[in-house]
Image (tube, rainbow, N blue to C red):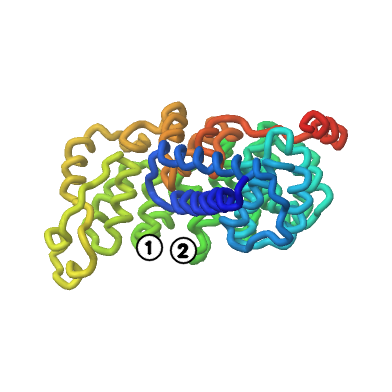
Amino acid sequence: MAVRLLAAHQSALSRLYRQRASMSTRDFVPGAELARLDQRLIGHIHACAQAAEPLPDDIPGDPAEAFAAASAALRNDTRAAMEWLAPALEEAEGDQCQGLVEAVALTTPPFGWCRVLSAYHRYPGARTPLLDAFYLAAARVPDALLNEALESPEQQAAALRCASIQHNWPAARFRPRYRSDLTDPATLPALRAGLLRDDPEAADALLSLLDGAIPLEATTDALRLNALLCPDHLSDVVWRAADETPETGLWLLALSGRRDAAERILQALRDARAPESAAAAWRWLTAQALPLRDRLQVVNDPGRAAAGGPVPDAAVARQWWDANAPGWDPAGRRILDGPADPERVATLATRWAGRAGDALMDLAALRERSQYVTGGWFHRRGEPGPVLPESQEEEVADAAVGQ
């Protein structure tokens, strides 16, 4: 391939990776938009892999460039790529490490997982990020590997995330780790695993931990678990977050799908502190994307009205509420203007990306936890991941088939 053409593919690959990462931070992204981006990304990965360029001496520090280099290498020659990647994963941190993890999870070919697993066994320092890659790929991981990883404090949280999506791991396997504390990185993965298995002890433990004197900023992930996976037992801390930190708290409150949450968010739409956050929360509950209105028409305080541009029109939300609130059962849960039944949620999870899509994927995991893991290719949502070999002999056999 001509040098200039290869450079164009590599540049496009890095640019699309950055766009994909940016999409994940937006509230509502149509699934078709992410699906199109993913297909373009896959096309550039294929083109770069076909070029079969020699591996660089060093892995780029930029996460997008690290993803681009690693993904093409994995598609071209997984064995050589893992010999290059695994030592780097032992040292990589932060966003660069995330780029490499995503490359392994998203671009390892079906018969390449034996090579990844071989690297896992031979490079102990790379095991935590490779466990993260197994989780992101929704892989079926051997029990023996997970049991060994759970004995390592460094690997424990990542191992619990992997174990949470395995069919043969009952809630009892996670209970001993429910009641550590929220600063222990293994606590939330264990609680999430229990909640996905509808374990009442997990809900009790989560509420008990949230009752402690913990700063709000340290509880965001725990509050998200509470609102999303056990909304019938909503902690008072979720309501406090909606009042004190509405930029994040209103979305957390909306994830519960509760009628009283909608009433609180309706009030927040008239609060000048975080109208956009209130509008996103309102949309999660009602599917209503509010039109914008000049801030001077909405806020009576001239000093507050002067700052910023248009704001979501709370009057439109009030009209919706007056028309629809009588039919909203206080005991029922509504998401995107409909019931939160498993089949509907699973369908919605294939229609939305962004923060809303991630929340829908987590809810869909209540129905089939091994097939709804956020972060994978959009077109693979709802599909099972790879099955990792149980033994070294199986690894060798798989490798031979893939050659």
Residue 188 position, x and y percent, is 59, 51
Residue highlighted by disc 2 = 216
Going by the image, does 191 lie left or right of 89?
Answer: left
Q: Is residue 276 left or right of residue 357?
A: left
The residue that appears at 46% across and 51% down in the rendered structure is 19
In the current view of this chain or complex, which residue is farthest to the right?
393
Percent position of residue 295, x then y:
17, 61
Let me know if residue 241 appears in the view: yes
Crowd band around label 2 with a 10 angstrom C-alpha radius: few (<14), some (14–19), many (20+): some
- Quadrant assignment, res 390: top right
At 41% from the left edge and 40% from the top edge, which residue is drawn? Answer: 33
For the N terminus, give its image quadrant.
Answer: top right
Q: CA distance from mark 2 to mark 1?
A: 8 Å
Looking at numbered disc 1 in the image, what kind of residue is underneath it?
Thr
Residue 338 is left or right of residue 392, and the answer is left
In depth, the one of 232 and 106 nearer the eye is 106
The image's mark for residue 306 is none
Tell me the element at label 1.
loop
Quadrant the C terminus occupies: top right
Residue 347 vs 154, above or below: the answer is: above
Question: Given contact means CB atoms under 8 Å apart, are the residues at marks 2 and 1 in contact?
Answer: yes
Please name the amino acid that badge 2 sits on: Leu
Q: Nearer the viewer, residue 63 or 95?
A: 63
* Residue farthest along the front direction in this orientation: 2
Question: Crowding at label 1, few (<14), some or many (≥20) Cα neighbours within 10 Å?
Answer: some
- Does 173 sit left or right of 221 as displayed? right
Looking at the image, the residue that sits furthest to the bottom is 303
Query: Is residue 174 something that shows in the picture?
Result: no
**Helix, strand or loop at disc 2?**
helix
Residue 263 sits above or below residue 403 on the image:
below
Residue identified by numbered label 1: 245
State the residue at coordinates (37%, 36%).
333
